[in-house]
Image (cartoon, grey):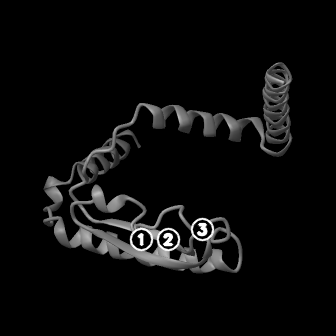
Amino acid sequence: MDYLAAKASRLKNRLQRKLRGARRKVKQSLEESVHPKAIRAVREAGHQAHKGYEAKPYPGEVTLLRAMEQPRGICEDRTNGWGDFALGGVKVHYVPGHHGAIMREPRARILVEKLTACLTEAQARAQAETPSRSTSDDPSREANQAVHRLAARSS
């Protein structure tokens, strides 16, 4: 009887390996037919970058746009892990829907509104924190004036 049990176990293992291989081939085939080569290349580059990346604390505040509906057990932390790295805190803005749906209408419109408001607020904060410079300290203004002077001379 041990002989038959061992033989059945080997057969089961072999069939499971073949099934895993077949699933992998089907998945790869579907990936290739659904996603363009460029998308797959970007995804692979992201995976490679992720392997060698070590997150470090960020001194400022992080703004997170998060889907309201989260699958169970995916990420119970409302900051999606950013709380450990954002030394200035995490401001969470919720967008209706689940992760895959917030990029589609009608939720995408809400996402754009929230993102626009966040960017406007960040820009205003940055301008308020940046000391105003005199026009003589502005290198781009000086460069533009020099170009205009040269153009005036050549005409």
| 121 to the left or right of 100 | left
- Residue at image position (81%, 26%) is 5
At label 3, the amino acid type is Pro
Foreground tag (1 vs 3): 3
Foreground tag (2 vs 3): 3
- Residue at image position (80%, 29%) is 21
* Labelled pair 1, 2 in contact (Cβ < 8 Å): yes
The residues bearing labels 2 and 3 have C-alpha atoms spaced at a distance of: 12 Å
Pick the front one: 1 or 141: 1
* Labelled pair 1, 3 in contact (Cβ < 8 Å): no
The residues bearing labels 1 and 2 have C-alpha atoms spaced at a distance of: 8 Å
Q: Position of residue 64 (x, y in %)?
A: 42, 67
Mark 1 highlights which residue?
Answer: 78
At label 2, the amino acid type is Arg
- Residue at image position (49%, 78%) is 94
- Residue at image position (62%, 40%) is 43
Going from N to C along the chain, the mark reached first, 2 or 3, is 2
Q: Position of residue 59 (x, y in %)?
A: 20, 56
As helix, strand or loop, the secondary structure at mark 2 comes to strand
On residue 117, the disc is none
As helix, strand or loop, the secondary structure at mark 3 comes to loop
As helix, strand or loop, the secondary structure at mark 1 comes to loop
Q: For the residue carrying disc 1, how many other residues have a C-alpha within 10 Å: few (<14), some (14-19), or many (20+)?
A: some
Mark 2 highlights which residue?
Answer: 66
| 33 to the left or right of 131 | right
| 111 to the left or right of 124 | right
Mark 3 highlights which residue?
Answer: 71
Going from N to C along the chain, the mark reached first, 1 or 3, is 3
At label 1, the amino acid type is Arg
Quarter occupied by the N terminus: top right
Pick the front one: 61 or 2: 2
Q: Position of residue 115 (x, y in %)?
A: 48, 72
